Image (tube, rainbow, N blue to C red):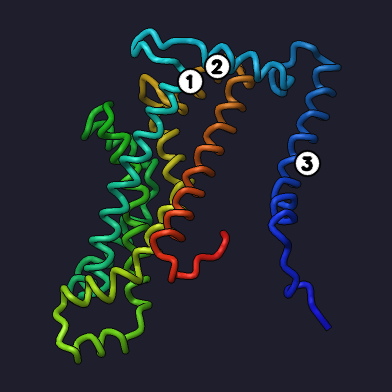
């Protein structure tokens, strides 16, 4: 007897099933919006879809007076630049420190406790400290992402290195490999795919820190724009920006997944 766990959807069915919850959510919003607007045509909480188009058309065509750039795309560029810098530096820190701490026992005994402690500190709690220490410019925003993401990446890399079968290390030593040769030829090929997965899983947290930093002090960015218009209850701007951020995150996740499959085809990447 075949069980449901043994049935796998086709590519078409998987696309359709993935789109189904989104379609249901859109339909539920349209129904609720129509009901609210019927009771109050001036309702701002759940505006009609046409209001989204009108608001975004204004923003996309509007030029930022300070930067002289299209407002919507300028906000997108600023947020993506901050996100990319923070995640890139965090990934480098996670790889270097994670491999060294995970592979060398003395380094693990020394630094594992402090890394664990740092990973448990709520990053938003130290946001005022970062602004005081590094000012209100770009540095504090990027450091917030690094502080929130890098310790978790380091811990994940340490666990990945620790999960490498000890027999591989012993065989490498038997063949005369030095510590650095074992790191380069045995450890790195096995943890690099995991690093990409860790970056993918950190995208949500990184976006949270970008939006939080931009909301408090910034002169542009997607988070800055959302919190700027919230005082006017401008849901026709806020909701499209939230959807746009979600789409950007999805595209970044998709790109990283394809990068992992292309660079490490032997890793047997599964859809996730």
Tell me residue 160's x, y (percent).
37, 71
Q: Nearer the viewer, residue 235 or 117?
A: 235
What residue did someone put label 3 on?
Answer: 24
Quarter of the picture holding the C terminus: bottom right
Q: Residues within 10 Å of mark 2 (few under 14, many from 20)?
A: few
Q: Nearer the viewer, residue 137 or 241?
A: 241
Q: Which is nearer the N-term, disc 3 or disc 1? A: 3
> Residue at (74%, 50%) from the top-left corner?
16
Q: Work out which residue is located at the far bottom of the displayed protein and give it.
A: 174
Query: Which of the two discs, 2 and 3, sits closer to the camera?
Result: 3
Q: Is residue 97 above or below residue 78?
A: below
Q: Quadrant of residue 125?
A: top left
Q: Which mark is residue 231?
A: 2
> Residue at (32%, 42%) from the top-left corner?
86
Callout 1: helix, strand or loop? Answer: helix
Callout 3: helix, strand or loop? Answer: helix
> Residue at (73%, 73%) from the top-left corner?
5
What residue did someone put label 1 on?
Answer: 72
Quarter of the picture holding the N terminus: bottom right
Judged left or right of residue 30, residue 67 is: left
Q: Residues within 10 Å of mark 3 (few under 14, many from 20)?
A: few
């Amino acid at each position: 007897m075949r069980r449901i766990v043994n049935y796998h959807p086709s590519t078409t069915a998987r696309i359709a099933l993935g789109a189904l919850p989104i379609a249901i959510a859109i339909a539920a919003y349209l129904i609720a919006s129509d009901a609210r607007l019927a009771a109050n045509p001036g309702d701002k909480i759940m505006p009609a879809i046409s209001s989204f188009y009108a608001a975004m058309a204004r923003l996309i065509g509007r030029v930022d007076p300070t930067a002289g750039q299209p407002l919507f795309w300028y906000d997108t560029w600023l947020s993506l630049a901050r996100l990319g810098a923070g995640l890139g530096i965090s990934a480098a820190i996670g790889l270097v420190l994670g491999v060294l701490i995970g592979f060398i026992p003395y380094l693990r005994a020394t630094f594992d406790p402090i890394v664990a402690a740092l990973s448990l500190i709520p990053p938003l709690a130290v946001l005022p400290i970062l602004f005081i220490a590094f000012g209100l410019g770009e540095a504090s925003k990027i450091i917030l992402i690094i502080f929130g993401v890098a310790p978790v990446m380091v811990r994940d890399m340490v666990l990945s290195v620790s999960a490498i079968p000890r027999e591989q290390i012993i065989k490498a030593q038997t063949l005369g490999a030095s510590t650095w040769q074992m790191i380069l030829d045995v450890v790195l090929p096995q943890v690099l795919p995991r690093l990409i997965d860790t970056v993918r899983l950190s995208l949500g947290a990184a976006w949270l820190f970008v939006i939080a930093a931009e909301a408090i002090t910034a002169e542009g960015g997607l988070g800055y724009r959302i919190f700027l218009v919230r005082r006017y209850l401008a849901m026709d701007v806020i909701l499209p920006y939230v959807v746009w951020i979600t789409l950007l995150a999805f595209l970044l996740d998709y790109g990283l997944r394809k990068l992992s499959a292309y660079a490490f085809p032997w890793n047997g990447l599964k859809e996730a």
